Image (cartoon, grey):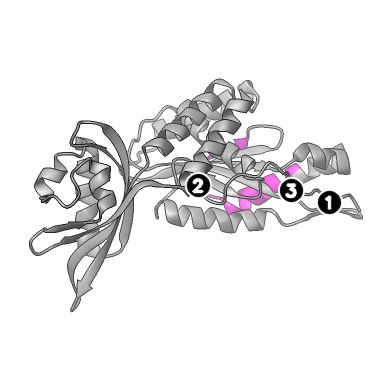
Amino acid sequence: MKTQQQHLATELCRISDKPAAIGAWECNLANEVLIWTDGVYDLFGLQRGSAIQRSSILDLYEEGSRSEMNRMRSSVIRNGGAFSLDCRIRTASNEKRWMRLIVGVGHQHGRPTRIFGSKQDVTAEKGLWNGLAALTRHEPIIAPSIRRDFEARLGQALLTRHFDREAFALILVDIDDFHDIVDAFGGPASNELLSRFDERLARLFPDALASGRTGKSEFALLLRMPSGPQRLSTSLENARHLLCRPVSRGTMVIDFTISIGAVCLEDERHRDPATLFAEAQAALHVAGMAGGNTLRMFDRPVANGISNSPPNRPAPG
């Protein structure tokens, strides 16, 4: 099973480094005339250079994706900014695909005049993320009893909170190569590291809706996500650096790194806690396969490839 997880994680990084069927597009807001590069035509399975109308292209979006895309499109035209959205589409030959849509707004004399961006086929990427989550769900890394306890608390949080369009995220944090830390510094020092780390999490995330230790060196958090995935990613990267400050115990200094896996839940408010946990665990696994000391978010682009070499562990002293 571990070999299958490694294979999927490696393949995920490979296809993320070599995106398929990606192209640029533009829409004139005055007349809704579309301009596409060849990659967008290929994505929708249309003849390159053929005439296109926005109304007919919208018919190729699945209903839920079309509704969400139109909502976000209207918002960004009205308020400015940009957004990214993964949409379900079907090609002209009725083949189902996932498309990553990125949208920005162009202005003239202070008024929005066009929207533009890119469209990318991420069907294979979606399949690999989902396959990795399925493997993780059936072969959890952490102790089942601890996992069930946190899943119960996560489920209770979902039931008792009203997330009316409010997004949130499940975060898993793991101390890299903790077994090496135990070997190098001993049990008492390693336990103190865990206690100090738990305290740091509590200080950095005092408003967590749920939190707890879910494994030997793994912790979980359920957080509100008011500003979107990109801001969450930045916030978690900043937190990662703060959480990794060395821990002193007597004459010893424990220098360590952590990996973070996260899954964002922005629209589907009634997800199964076990599914959320499996997706976050899959993201954490990809972070670990990248060599640790990094953040990965489920179902988001993967960068930097995978390394099979663990980071060097300092000796006690």
Q: Amino acid at mark 2?
A: Val
Residue 262 visible, this angle: no
Task: Report the amino acid beneath label 3.
Answer: Pro
Q: Which comes sooner in the sequence, label 2 or label 1?
A: 2
Q: Earlier in the sequence, mark 3 or mark 2?
A: 2
Instruction: Please give left or right for residue 6 compared with residue 217 in the image.
Output: left
* Nearest the eye: 204 or 293: 293
**Does 254 appear in magenta?**
no
Q: Is residue 211 in the magenta section?
A: yes
| Span highlighted in magenta in the image | 194-213
Do labels 3 and 1 touch, CB within 8 Å? no
Please give the residue where the numbered disc 1 appears in the rendered image. 314
Say if residue 244 shows up in the picture.
yes
User: Residue 76 lies in what quarter of the image?
Assistant: bottom left
How far apart are the two marked residues, 3 and 1, measured between alpha carbons?
Answer: 10 Å
Q: CA distance from mark 2 to mark 1?
A: 28 Å
Location of mark 3 (residue): 311
Q: Which mark is residue 302?
A: 2
> Residue drawn 74% across and 43% down?
195
